[in-house]
Image: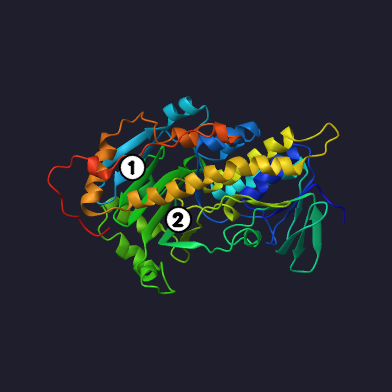
Amino acid sequence: MSHPDVLVVGGGIGGLGVAFSLTRQGQTVRLLESAPAFGEVGAGIQLAPNCTRILDDYGLLDEAKSLGVVPDAMVIRDAVDGSELTRLDLRHLEERYGCPYLVIHRSDLHGLLLRACERAGVELVNDATVTAYENTDGGARVTLASGETHEAGLVIAADGLHSAARKLLVDDRPVSSAYVAYRGTVPAEQPRVRSVDLSEVVVYIGPRCHFVHYGLRGGEMLNQVAVFESPKALAGQDDWGTPDELDAAFAGACDFVRDGLPFMWRDKWWRMFDRDPVMTWVHGRIALLGDSAHPPLQYIAQGAIMAIEDGWVLGEHVARNRAEDGTVDWTAALAAYEAVRPEHCRRVLTTSRKWGELWHLDGLAREQRNALLRARDTYDYSFTDWLYGPTALTPDQEPEMFTPIPLDSADVGEPVPARGTA
């Protein structure tokens, strides 16, 4: 079997994204996917301007918009009393950052990238489970469960949370947050959907839980996500995140949130894990990408986006380090990739954890958080500029982080007792 320039391990959003990115830069790419067919599970996914900007560069934004919804606003509400706390004007946000905020079904985004790879000539291989990685004199090699081997000048491990390649760089394990997510979609003809403004992305934040909804596929359905902390997980039990815990977690929530629970898929749920940030992603000619490098908690909706950014950045550095005869200085390209992406993704991972803590506060801390959110101006972008602006290609382009606001700076008057146990 001939050797391609690049092997990509993993056919998820990150793997397809980098395969397309490098093919655009003149590289021959073979993608190895363990499943017998390409596909993606889940429901909705949010794509902020730092992602839609890349889709636009790839020539894929119009197709993505045709498959998804470009909402008008993001609204944060209190899950207990349902009151509005703050909002983002997403149309104004698009003017600020030059590209839209988009919500799309995860399988639609995956299909879009798959079709782009097929058009670009990426070699797509199924039933190819990679069990081992190793460097060679001229590149790197992977071994499949079948015993078959594949070699290339570069191997990109986009093999997810339980990455086999990550073990080459760090001996760590996924970190459980003790939170679990339920998902579900509601057809547009249901009365619940008719009562919802599908032009809004809405997040209800509550004590140890939150609930998200937004429209998908041009308003054909309502996407819902319910997330909560599992008492069974905290107690160390193996059977955690079960439907009885879902109902108990939202017992103190407002009517709208509780009314959405019967529409959740109750036969499957997603336990929420991340990993501690690591700053080394490259081992010879083997490089981590996406969740293999930086699996986040989902609170700022950047997981798939970071993976797409990784692929775009690597492609740009391949272009900068490609000679006239087409050969690539992989050492230089990988060094430039590793110089910028780990620090950005470290910021996203740590901010995601903190944002989750902020959403799930109770008691006085919840009242202080609510007061600070209510005081925020709709057009204050101090907490999004570091994230939604152009993706940095070099460390000097990485914008400064936001300045946190202490909870105890909020004026809430007399402390208010916690309401319910949502």
Q: Could you say where residue 227 lies in the image, as x and y percent from the top left?
A: 39, 57
Residue drawn where x is 47% and y is 66% of the image:
267
Could you tell me which secondary element the residue under label 1 belongs to? strand
Q: Nearer the viewer, residue 382 or 196?
A: 382
Q: How many numbered dots are placed on residues in this image?
A: 2
Q: Are marks 1 and 2 in contact (CB under 8 Å)?
A: no
Identify the secondary structure beneath mark 2.
Answer: strand
Labelled disc at residue 48:
none
On screen, residue 70 above or below 80 = above
Front residue of this view, candidates 336 and 37: 336
CA gap between label 1 and label 2 equals 20 Å
Coordinates of residue 213 in the picture (x, y in percent): 40, 47
> From the image, which quarter does the C terminus lie in?
bottom left
Between 297 and 216, the residue placed more toward the observer is: 297
- Relative to 369, is 132 on the left or the right? right
Percent of width and height locating residue 240: 41, 70
Residue shown at 74% from the left, 51% from the top? 285
Query: Which image quadrant for residue 322?
Result: top right
Q: Earlier in the sequence, mark 1 or mark 2?
A: 1
> How many neighbours does mark 2 have within 10 angstroms: few (below 14), some (14-19), or many (20 or more)?
many
The chosen color scheme is rainbow
**Where does the image place residue 87, in percent across and percent down from the top left?**
34, 36
Looking at the rendered image, the quarter that the N terminus falls into is: bottom right
Label 1 neighbour load within 10 Å: few <14, some 14-19, many 20+: many
Judge left or right: residue 303 versus residue 5. Answer: left
Q: Amino acid at mark 2?
A: Gly
Above or below — where is 360 with respect to 57?
A: below
Which residue lies under the disc numbered 1? 76
Residue located beneath label 2 in the image: 184
